[in-house]
Image: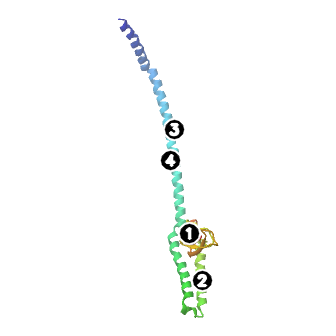
Amino acid sequence: MSDNNNKKPETNNQELKEKESENPQNIEEKSKDKKETSIEDKLKDTEDKLLRSLAELENQRRRFDKEIKDAFEFGSFNFARESLAILDNLQRAKDAIRNDKDLKINKDLEKFIENITIIEKDITTIFEKNKIKKIETKGKKFDPNLHQAMTEIEDEKSDAGIILQEVQAGYMFGERLLRPALVGVSKKKN
């Protein structure tokens, strides 16, 4: 019987705890705590979501503004690249005319070449007004971001990697590479 008596008080303690927890006042306090905690948590979550949404909207606005700016600045990028062929062809024409045996004896040859040079300068001026500039090459250090090496030229006078020859001019469109310069680069003799 003593065993049963020992169990009863434990049961009584447990029952008391259950009764206390079932007490309407305790239930109300627990639910209020839960509600307050959950309302505060919900408010924090909502505030966090709002801040994230605002940050996302700001990032999208910035991206959109950058895309519009790029479209205005570089919208004519392909047109500019293809227009470089005009300058190339004018230069080839001048070289071909100067090297032609039959045209060399023509007294008007220099006037003709002069006119082609004027056209070249006009096109170059139009390009410069539109942020298209020629890349300087001769005597400069080779930069793979701006130049494309076509040949290596042995030269003891120059340091290795210095541009000695320009095969085809390169151009920048603002800060963007329009076309790399095709160049001949110095190398040391072995």
Kindly identify which numbered label has been placed on residue 44.
3
Instruction: Classify the position of the N terminus by image quarter.
Output: top left
Q: Nearer the viewer, mark 2 or mark 3?
A: 2
User: What crowding class fits label 2: few (fewer than 14 Cα within 10 Å), some (14-19), or many (20 or more)?
Assistant: some
- For label 4, the crowd category at 10 Å Cα-Cα, with few meaning under 14, some 14 to 19 and many 20 or more, is few
Query: Left of 138 or right of it: where is 61?
Result: left
Give the Cα distance between marks 4 and 3: 14 Å
Q: Can you give x and y, in whole percent of width and height, for residue 173 in the image?
A: 56, 68
Return the residue at label 1. 147
Q: Residue furthest right?
A: 157
Identified by mark 2, the residue type is Thr
Q: Of label 3 and label 1, which has the lower sequence position?
A: 3
For the C terminus, the image quarter is bottom right
**Discs 1/2, front:** 1
Q: Amino acid at mark 1?
A: His
Question: Mark 4 is on which residue type?
Answer: Ser
Q: Residue at x 38, y 11 (%)?
A: 7
Which mark's residue is nearer the viewer, 3 or 1?
1
**As drawn, 61 above or below 30:** below
Label 4 or label 1, whichever comes before in sequence order: 4
Measure the C-alpha gap from mark 4 to mark 1.
Answer: 44 Å
- Are the residues flagged by discs 4 and 3 in contact, CB closer than 8 Å? no
Q: Position of residue 159 (x, y in %)?
A: 63, 69
Look at mark 2 in the image and give the residue it sits on: 117
> Looking at the rendered structure, which numbered label has been put on residue 53?
4
| Classed neighbour count for the residue bearing mark 3: other residues with Cα under 10 Å, few (<14), some (14–19), many (≥20) | few
Disc with the residue nearer the chain's start (4 vs 3):
3
Q: Amino acid at mark 3?
A: Lys
